[in-house]
Image (cartoon, helix red, strand yellow):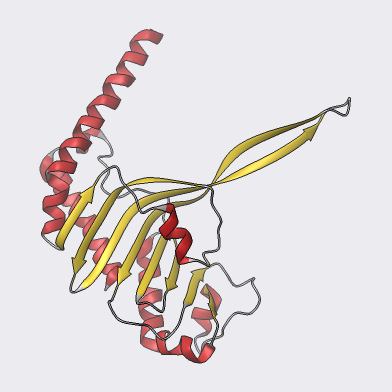
Amino acid sequence: IRDSLCTGLITLKEYKGHIKEQLSRSVVPQVLSEVFDQVEYDAYRHISPEVIYASGAFPFGFDKASGGDYIKASYRGVGLELCDLMLEEEVRTTSTDSDGNSTSDTSNRIVFVGQWLILDFHKELSADLCVFEGGRKRSGQIETESAAFNEKFGIFCDSAHDAFYILTPNMMEHIMAMDRRAGGKVYLRFLREGKIHVAVNSRRDHFEVGNLNDADLPSLRMKFRGEVRYVTELID
């Protein structure tokens, strides 16, 4: 029974892998090209850890990055990179037994699972700015005129004056609306060079087959169009 079960699991894994391979060559690129321009898609690649580190000031550290479903494209003149990403932090623990002998153990703790989006507006912004959900406990935060926004997000910038060129009432309203649709905690990093990192800790992947009952092409195309709509709504 055990051998049969193992064989069945291996066959299932190979079958789902085969489906993903077919989707990465046909269905997903086709759906992406319906909305985006200059599309590059790689089911097994992700944004590099170096790029994520360089963005700076996200409220979590990590030692390991993995992911897939990398997309590079253009949407309404805005350059974008997107992928599913999992970030893990290495945690070391030490325990001492009754004889006073100490042993150390290392494990990985997941700090982020979701989508990482980089937008390039090809024009300089007024400031480097961090806006992230659940960051109200930190000191040195900027207060806006919106009590609801202040309660929801932590805001950090070297200059409050420059920050308000970005965080206009209209922009804050859009960020709040985006957050309600995101399905997870949202982290925004505005870089003066004109790029914005949007990290959504949604605890789910995009463009996955899911249950094999869903693995018919019309259903998958509809599912992936919904995922693309989610991305364009974030960008808009």
Q: What residue is at 55 percent from the left and 58 percent from the top?
A: 60
Q: Is residue 65 above or below residue 120?
A: above
Between 158 and 210, the one lying in front of the other is 158
Residue 144 lies, in percent from the top left, at 52, 87
Identify whether 216 is placed above or below 7: below
Is 198 placed left or right of 159 in the picture?
left
At which x and y percent is residue 157?
53, 80
Determine the residue positioned at 41% across, 85% down: 166
- Kindly identify the residue that appears in the image at 30 percent across and 50 percent down: 206
Comparing 11 with 21, the one in front is: 21
Question: How far across and down, in percent of the image, does residue 179 sit?
Answer: 40, 68
Quarter-of-image position of residue 137: bottom right
On screen, residue 158 versus residue 65, left or right, reads right
- Which image quarter is the C terminus in? bottom left
Asked if one can make out residue 168 in the rendered structure from this viewpoint, the answer is no
Q: Is residue 96 visible?
A: yes
* Position of residue 18 measured from the top left corner of the image (x, y, whole percent): 20, 30
